[in-house]
Image (cartoon, grey):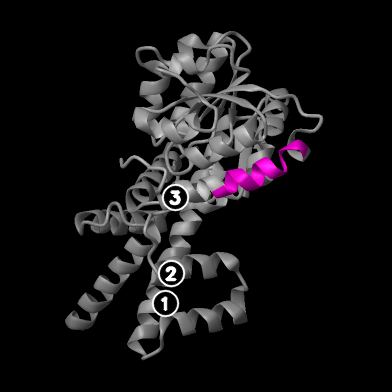
Amino acid sequence: MAVRSIDDPVYRACRAALAVAQHSSDKMVRGVKEMKIGFLGLGNMGTPMALRLLAAGHELSVWNRTEARTEPLLREGAIAAATPAEAELGADAVITMLFDDAAHEEALFGANGLLDALSPGALHISCSTISVALSEKLTAEHARYGHRFVAAPVFGRPNVAEAGKLWIVMAGDEAAVADARHLLEPLARGISVIGREPRQAHAVKLGGNFLISTMIQSLSEAFVFAESQGIAPGVFLEAVNSALFQSPFYAAYGNVMLHPPEHAGASISLGAKDTRLLREAAASRNTRLSLADSLAEIFEQAKQAGLADQDWAVGQYRIAQQRGVLNAKSA
């Protein structure tokens, strides 16, 4: 993964968001206890989230598998941790925003991992998109160690994280959820408490990402249809969205599809991973989702076409265009 330099546009956007947050930080932390937080995972989402926590007045100890990714946070006053365990030292809470299940297994259960370092009663907040199975495992292991565990996955792309307007879904013990909510409010425009089982919040996140993928796919195929009729996709979207949905969400993703961003907000690889986790969670409850099966094939085709690192909206649109042409030739 590329290291963000001080001149990188994503880092500059994060800094702009931090400046706005710092301007209002007195209001954000008035009456709020400043906390010492361990933060693991400084990718495209983790970095702006951590910056906003710094702006809210909290002390951060940060760790990332690629050490250079910590540099933007260190410039803003964060402390570097050499290992996940070191990020926990003296922390009131530890937040994980890691890529996938494998990264969590390494950071939590590996050598110098977080799980053994956490003290009884310590709070672990998982903001990542992980499998329901891993969420269940973490719940059991934290209970065995006497830790508190809250699932708090987030909805929103990096630019939304920079603005502090994520939507967070939370689940866990009521008291632990209250503490986690108190900490995460500077990151969010809203929070939904799903239930008492952390697995439930991670399931909602997977279901939400499934809905995004299906929306993108239907919009992609509608664009292909519009093009076949000599209608510009942008004109089609403006008319249909105004008439039917009136949704900023459709408008935003349509814009991404038609004007691919320099940096992917969420990649085809991430979409494929989340679809796989959704299908696995459904299968564990004897449930099959036929539309998810079809999406898995589309994501796999996109990866085979070399689009793994493309924004998932762009990649799905490209595959819809390819499939549309092939179908026309075979008709």
Q: Earlier in the sequence, mark 3 or mark 2?
A: 3
Do labels 1 and 2 touch, CB within 8 Å? yes
Image quadrant occupied by the C terminus: bottom left
Q: What is the number of the mark on residue 218?
A: 2
Label 1 sits on a secondary structure element that is: helix
| Mark linked to residue 299 | none
Q: Position of residue 82 (x, y in %)?
A: 40, 17
Q: Residue furthest left?
A: 330
User: Which residue does the numbered mark 1 point to in the structure image?
Assistant: 222
Q: Taking 279 as reference, is 321 left or right?
A: left
Q: Name the residue under label 3.
A: 10
Q: How many callouts does the rendering have?
A: 3
Residue 285 seen in the current view: yes
In the picture, residue 101 is in which quadrant? top left
Q: Main secondary structure of the magenta part?
A: helix
Q: What residue type is labelled 2?
A: Ser
Tell me if mark 1 has few (under 14), some (14-19) or many (20+) residues whose alpha carbon lies within 10 angstroms of its own: some
Residue 192 seen in this snapshot: no
Q: What's the residue type where badge 3 is placed?
A: Val
Q: Distance between the residues labelled 3 and 1?
A: 31 Å
300 lies above or below 6: below
Residue at the spot 76% in from the left edge and 36% down from the top edge: 26
